[in-house]
Image (cartoon, rainbow, N blue to C red):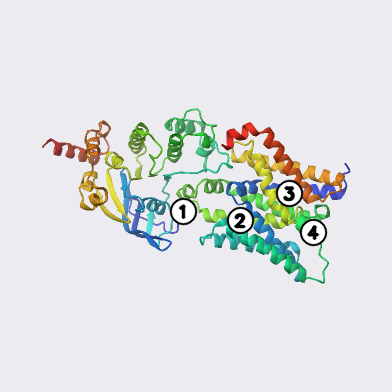
Amino acid sequence: MMLSDFMIRALLAGLGVMLAAAPLGCFVVWRRMAFFGAATAHAAVLGVALALALSMSVFVGVLATSLLMAIMITLLSNRGYAMDTLLGVIAHASLAFGLVAVSFVTDVRIDLMAYLFGDILAVGGTDLLIIWGGAALVFALTIWRWEALLLATVSEDLAYAEGFDPPREALILTLSLAIVVAVAIKVVGVLLIAALLVIPAAAARLFSRTPERMAMGAAVIGAVSIGAGLWASWHLDTPTGPTIVCAAASIFAGLSVIARPLAAKFMG
Amino acid sequence: MAMSAATMKTAPDALIRAQQLNVEIAGRSILEQIDLRIQRGEIVTVVGPNGSGKSTLLRALIGAIQPTSGQVVRMNGLRIGYVPQRLHIDPTLPLTVRRFFNLPRRHGHRAIDQALARAGIEGRNETPMAALSGGQFQRALMARALLDRPDVLMLDEASQGLDQTGTADFYRQIEEVRNDLGCAVLLVSHDLHVVMRAADRVICLNHHICCEGLPEAVSADPEYQALFGSVDEEALALFRHDPHHHPHGGHEHHGAEYHRKDSHDAK
């Protein structure tokens, strides 16, 4: 395999995203927020359209709409809507509005595919800085709030009794999710970000006994998926983002078969 | 650790108190004008029919529910050991007993081993919480709540899922805990036997506090009898002749109350 500059940058970008996505993805799985990642990611398409229309940086536009969406979902979910219904409405609506909005931006040639499926091979030096900056921030936030978040995930009431503030912890999680979406959009694209959050975590669950080991397992599986996906897309000439997700899904499937007896034991 | 914005200085004898506490959920009034104080070293039982607001009261006291009006005042730095009615751990979340006991603070191996022994699950450190039986799970919740030597232990229907022997042990353990740690115990139950056996003071709740006081005084109260009927003889017999209810040193008034009842019986 040739290790040209852009391949190294692609690998570094992918690993950066995984650093943040692995622990965060575990919470997404534990808290049954898989749809949440998708909804936030879909909102990013709207962000892309707005950024292009206003000639802003795409990163800023995506970050803004993702944060806005995350906060909106958090507020609405406290009003008694069923979470999956709410997310279903918002995820699909924001994707549709985003796609329609993009069609109005005619003066710039947009490769919409690049935002839907990512273009990890086009990652430049600045992108790397943004990705690693955002990932490091989210990683630090997650580690800092780890115990509180974990206890609030096990039981909000136990967290309250210990003096924590579960809604605040949930907001930190939501904002972290928005940041990861914003930095990851270039790597795997809107449609596949949620996959990178959920699949490695789900695969790691099969052989993990503690939350920490599951997060580390997710990071390793995610990193291997990114490496394997890059390698495969290079040799098979396939779109890179989807190939990475295919690699992750294959690892999940393979581990499910191997870990089946274990899974039966641990997942009840 | 700050418990909530409502935390403020309080009389030194009250660990936690509610003042004119009102809680509405979805427009329905669940708790009305609740006033209560929990003192160090006392065992207080809240009884009431289903849907009377017992769990809501506990959740308001730990800060999980914001009162519509009134306030909850906790002693500064109050450590609460809370044992919920039930706890569902999502199967996607791998959690061994040891990890659960170390959440959110780490404890030494010896403390963990003692807690496991207390819960009757020695050597099960690495067992997933999901693999514990209902009774073991409930005892593990209790053991975890005791790890940080709480000032007040709050139990919400904690004997659920325990068989008769288990329940008896459980409430014997509550008295031991109170004596060992000197903490207050606030427990919620609809089980009248439990009330009669384990409480220094009973609060009868039906959205508002109907009556409160010594177990026997409460069970004779007309409002209480309207809710529960008069206490059946078996419950009273358990109460009067329970060998575990011997008075113990350090809780003079507690013992004295039972003496008084015994002499009353003799007449």
Badge 1 and badge 4 both on one subunit: no
Percent coordinates x, y for residue B8 in the rendering: 40, 57
Residue at mark 4: A113
For discs 1 and 2, the disc positioned in front in the rendered view: 2
Amino acid tagged 4: Met
The residue at the point 23 percent across, 53 percent down is: B223
Quadrant in which the C terminus of chain A appears: top right
Residue A31: x percent and y percent? 57, 49
**Which image quadrant for residue B251?**
top left
Say whether residue A181 is left or right of residue B17: right
Q: Chain of mark 2?
A: A
Q: Earlier in the sequence, mark 4 or mark 2?
A: 4
Q: Are marks 3 and 2 on the same chain?
A: yes
Element under disc 1: loop
When the figure is inspected, residue A249 is found, relative to residue B65, above or below; the finding is: above
Residue on which disc 3 sits: A16
Report the mark closest to the observer, 1 or 3: 3
Q: Which residue is mark 1?
A: B2
B192 lies left or right of A88: left
* Mark 3 → mark 4, Cα distance in angstroms: 22 Å
Q: CA distance from mark 1 to mark 2?
A: 23 Å
Q: Position of residue B18 (x, y in %)?
A: 35, 56
Query: What's the chain of the residue with tag 4?
Result: A
- Chain identity of mark 3: A
The amino acid beneath tag 2 is Thr
For the residues beneath circles 1 and 2, the answer to whether they share a chain is no
